[in-house]
Image (spheres, rainbow, N blue to C red):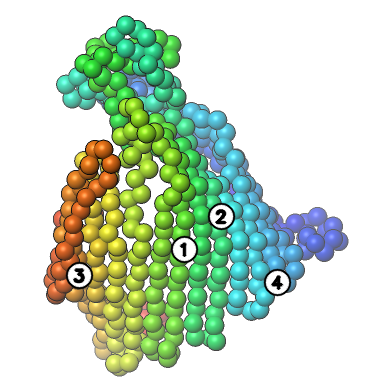
């Protein structure tokens, strides 16, 4: 359910500060009933379907403080059956000193709830003597003498607080600029699966009430919260009309991970390393040119893309994605038949790339050692994802048929 209205008009307050204020408010309710047919979720253990309810309420106000300054305030409260309530505030202030020029500053808090697998996975004997258990209640790990060696809290939502400063504007009716810098602080990263108890190495897992997680000894895997970090970045987008028919565009993204806090000893080291793996390039950009009707009835263009190398780590998908750059070209032509356009595109026509390098970790230093030799050429293959095939040149051809006012 959602409703919106103009506060000043509705209340007839006569206070000019409220003139033009828009208010949006609403609420949501969702009920999920899930079953794995008693196979691999917690319904196997309880013999009952999993029922989860989620409730939420939100509001947003947008107030023009003057003809140049606008204030936006928003908030949302969510309550999930499995977690404490979460309040997500948001605030933004925009300043437009002249027409087509706007500066903004904003703050936003958001959260990511654990998935159903992370809370309700229940698959003993996933493979011989290995079981996967969702972390809804938490665990207690004991040694062979029954002494508690560690406790694991129930999994909870991951939190993100972000500040952003941005600018958007049009310069001399030719150049469009969209720029932003931001900082995000993440807390309670959701980890991938990790081993938290191994009876064959002297540790066994129990629920907080003391009951064993399964009747037979199991090497137990689960999910948990681990680590925190800051992410800082900047994005810049440009679009320049050289003429009405020749348009250049480009964008760049810079991003950096810092202030990482994670376990440095014990069984949680591996979980912490994977949960805080950045898995993203620190620099990427693309630039291109579009030619519109420079050749009669035709549109043509090209795009150059660059992505610098980065380390990716997620389970068995582990290695360095090498630096690569690509050139794409496209062409389309309007046919004599009304509304019919023929199109052709070549992706990765030309590329420069290094070869994929599986990571080799030095245990003492916990650093990857990689080497990279770049090769360039037409049809040169490159890798964009760990454990995915290399990509070479790809050609796409097609026909498009439009009707109505846009059939030109």
Image x and y of residue 307, in percent: 30, 64
Q: Secondary structure at mark 2?
A: strand
Identified at 18% across, 49% down, the residue is: 358
**Spatial CA span between label 4 and label 3:** 47 Å
Q: Residue at x 70, y 71 (%)?
A: 68
Mark 3 or mark 2: which comes first in sequence?
A: 2
Residue at mark 1 to residue at mark 4: CA–CA distance = 25 Å
Q: Nearer the viewer, residue 25 or 354?
A: 354
Residue marked by disc 2: 163
In this rendering, which labeled residue sits more in front, label 4 or label 3?
3
Q: In the rendered structure, which disc, 4 or 2, sits on the residue that comes first in sequence?
A: 4
Please report whichever mark, 4 or 3, sits nearer to the chain's N-terminal start: 4
Q: Nearer the viewer, residue 55 or 212?
A: 212
Measured Cα–Cα span from mark 3 to mark 2: 36 Å
Q: Secondary structure at mark 4?
A: loop
Q: Residue at x 63, y 58 (%)?
A: 92
Name the residue that disc number 3 marks: 352
- Which of pointers 2 and 1 lies earlier in the amino acid sequence? 2
**Residue 240, relative to residue 119: is it above or below?**
below
């Amino acid at each position: 359910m959602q409703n919106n209205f103009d506060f000043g008009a509705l209340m007839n307050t006569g206070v000019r500060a409220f003139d033009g204020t828009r208010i949006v408010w609403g609420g949501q309710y969702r009920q999920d009933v899930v079953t794995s047919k008693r196979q691999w979720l917690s319904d196997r253990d309880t013999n009952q379907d999993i029922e989860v309810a989620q409730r939420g309420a939100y509001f947003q106000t947008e107030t023009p403080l003057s003809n140049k300054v606008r204030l936006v305030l928003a908030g949302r409260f969510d309550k999930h059956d499995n977690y404490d309530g979460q309040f997500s505030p948001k605030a933004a202030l925009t300043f437009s000193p002249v027409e087509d020029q706007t500066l903004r500053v904003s703050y936003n808090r958001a959260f990511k709830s654990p998935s159903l697998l992370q809370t309700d996975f229940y698959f003993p004997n996933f493979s011989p003597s290995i079981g996967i258990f969702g972390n809804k209640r938490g665990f207690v790990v004991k040694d062979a003498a029954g002494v508690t060696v560690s406790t694991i809290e129930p999994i909870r939502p991951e939190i993100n607080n972000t500040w952003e400063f941005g600018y958007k504007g049009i310069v001399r009716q030719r150049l469009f600029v969209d720029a932003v810098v931001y900082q995000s602080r993440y807390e309670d990263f959701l980890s991938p699966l990790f081993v938290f108890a191994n009876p064959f190495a002297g540790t066994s897992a129990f629920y907080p009430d003391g009951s064993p997680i399964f009747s037979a000894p199991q090497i137990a895997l689960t999910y948990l919260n681990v680590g925190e970090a800051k992410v800082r970045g900047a994005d810049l987008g440009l679009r320049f009309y050289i003429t009405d028919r020749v348009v250049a565009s480009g964008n760049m993204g810079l991003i950096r991970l810092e202030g990482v806090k994670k376990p440095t000893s014990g069984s949680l080291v591996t979980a912490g390393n994977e949960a805080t793996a950045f898995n993203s390039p620190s620099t990427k950009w693309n630039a291109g040119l579009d030619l519109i009707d420079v050749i009669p009835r035709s549109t043509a263009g090209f795009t150059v893309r660059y992505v610098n190398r980065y380390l990716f780590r997620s389970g068995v998908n582990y290695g360095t994605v090498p630096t690569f750059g690509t050139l794409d070209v496209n062409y389309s032509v309007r046919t004599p038949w009304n509304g019919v356009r023929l199109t052709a595109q070549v992706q990765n026509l030309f590329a420069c790339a290094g070869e994929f390098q599986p990571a080799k970790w030095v245990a003492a230093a916990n650093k990857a050692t990689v080497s990279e030799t770049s090769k360039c050429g037409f049809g040169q293959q490159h890798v964009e994802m760990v454990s995915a095939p290399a990509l070479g040149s790809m050609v796409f051809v097609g026909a498009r048929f439009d009707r109505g006012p846009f059939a030109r």
